[in-house]
Image (cartoon, helix red, strand yellow):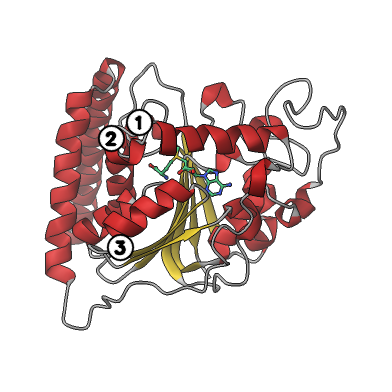
């Protein structure tokens, strides 16, 4: 056998055994999966994720690393937040008051990791740690956090990655908490505003490495007159047979999940990511793929897709965030800016 042929044969064997190893690992992972994930698994995983991030931060940080807090020109405090209890629709009132109860009556900023039913659990830092590691967040990077709640993430992202964060939220008590406890310890900025109506030109194009919305966009409408799955978009104004905005015009709709995701992506720098997590919660009743249609996200970014500026992926959160098996099968929308 000539030398060249042997090399070809050997490389074929190596490839074959790699396939074999890959298959074995794949089988092992499948076997592990039905066991699901417990809180102790998540604890161990979080420790590992955070320690990885901190090691990377130490290696990458230099005297030139930007350290100043972000100073975006946010809209006036409280912009778009309904004054005096006057809401455009009943469902917007319901979502606002629910978060208000968590922020004020239950004081979940002091008592947990954030504004979630029964308080933010360990899954809150875990989600952010996974995302930061996934996108390769580096010291000095800017992050935009939509629906930042109590602002914990701004402190974590600085501690773990050396990143700087601007957070936006419509709950005044949560933003006040972030300003009091997070701003003094991490380069952060927090703005009190409604993200559905107030993301606009003040947020410069391509200015952040990462834009996140973790369990936030599902509270917004999916289309001009569409909220939840059901015979009508209850509990809005009771309009029946509402029309559906055509695919090509979705990104121009007002106050929708698409529009907010679109603005987040507009603010994402080349090579950066927009990450919208916790979609399809509550059996999917707020998922625009159900309430508008399967092509919702592709339609939302159809122009960017046509210009080859974006890569879109929808990822099950079961394994990446180690969800419990009885939890809703949620998914993350991950957008990468290619051009
Ligand atoms: C379930 S909490 C998640 C908080 C945080 N992102 C986390 O992962 O822990 C949802 C957050 O979104 C905020 N939010 C919901 N709708 C909003 C809107 N229209 N404008 C601004 N903030 C909003 C709530 O006040 C709350 O802090």
Q: Is residue 180 left or right of residue 176?
A: left
Label 2 crowd (10 A; few <14 / some 14-19 / many >=20): few
- Mark 1 close to ligand 1, CB under 8 Å: no
Q: Earlier in the sequence, mark 3 or mark 2?
A: 2
- The furthest residue to the front: 84
Query: What's the CA distance linking mark 1 and mark 2?
Result: 7 Å
Contact between labelled residues 2 and 1, with CB atoms less than 8 Å apart: yes
Which residue is the site of mark 2?
111
Q: Residues within 10 Å of mark 3 (few under 14, many from 20)?
A: some
- From the viewer's perspective, is residue 335 above or below residue 39? below
* Label 3 sits on residue: 183
Residue 236: % across, % down: 75, 32
Judged from the image, the secondary structure of the residue bearing numbered disc 3 is loop
* Picture disc at residue 204: none
Which of the 4 image quadrants contains residue 62?
Answer: bottom left
Q: CA distance from mark 3 to mark 2?
A: 19 Å
What number is the disc on residue 119?
1
N-terminal of the two: label 1 or label 3? 1
Q: Secondary structure at mark 1?
A: loop
Residue under the image location 58 percent in, 72 percent down: 202
Q: Is residue 294 visible?
A: no
Q: CA distance from mark 1 to mark 3?
A: 22 Å
Q: Work out whether mark 1 precedes mark 2 in sequence or the reverse, and give the earlier one.
A: 2
Name the residue rendered at 53%, 51% in the picture. 312
Residue 200 visible (yes or no): yes
**Front-most of 76 and 275?**
76
As drawn, the residue found furthest toward the bottom would be 64
Residue 286 placement, left or right of 149: right
């Amino acid at each position: 056998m000539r030398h060249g042929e042997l090399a070809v044969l050997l490389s074929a064997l190596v490839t074959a055994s790699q396939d074999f190893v890959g298959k074995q690992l794949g089988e092992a992972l499948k076997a592990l999966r039905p066991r699901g994930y417990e809180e102790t698994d998540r604890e161990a995983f979080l420790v590992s994720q955070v320690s990885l991030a901190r090691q990377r931060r130490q290696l990458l940080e230099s005297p030139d690393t930007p350290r100043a807090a972000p100073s975006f020109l946010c809209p006036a405090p409280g912009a778009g937040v309904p004054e005096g209890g006057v809401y455009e629709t009943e469902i917007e009132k319901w979502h606002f008051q629910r978060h208000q109860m968590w922020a004020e009556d239950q004081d979940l900023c002091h008592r947990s990791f954030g504004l979630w039913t029964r308080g933010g659990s360990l899954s809150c830092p875990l989600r952010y740690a996974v995302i930061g590691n996934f996108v390769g967040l580096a010291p000095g990077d800017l992050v935009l956090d939509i629906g930042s709640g109590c602002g914990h993430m701004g402190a974590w992202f600085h501690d773990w990655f050396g990143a700087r964060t601007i957070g936006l939220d419509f709950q005044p008590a949560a933003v006040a908490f972030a300003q009091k406890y997070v701003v003094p310890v991490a380069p952060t900025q927090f703005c009190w505003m409604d993200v559905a109506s107030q993301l606009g030109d003040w947020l410069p194009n391509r200015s952040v490495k990462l834009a996140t919305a973790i369990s936030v966009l599902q509270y917004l409408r999916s289309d001009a007159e569409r909220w939840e799955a059901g015979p009508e978009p209850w509990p809005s104004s009771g309009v029946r047979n509402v029309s559906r905005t055509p695919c090509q015009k979705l990104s121009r709709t007002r106050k929708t999940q698409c529009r907010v995701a679109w603005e987040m992506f507009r603010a994402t720098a080349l090579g950066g990511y927009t990450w919208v997590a916790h979609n399809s919660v509550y059996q999917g009743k707020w998922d625009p793929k159900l309430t508008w249609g399967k092509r919702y996200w592709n339609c939302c970014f159809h122009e960017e897709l046509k210009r080859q500026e974006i890569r879109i992926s929808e990822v099950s959160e079961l394994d990446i965030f180690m969800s419990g098996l009885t939890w809703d099968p949620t998914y993350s929308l991950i957008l990468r800016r290619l051009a």
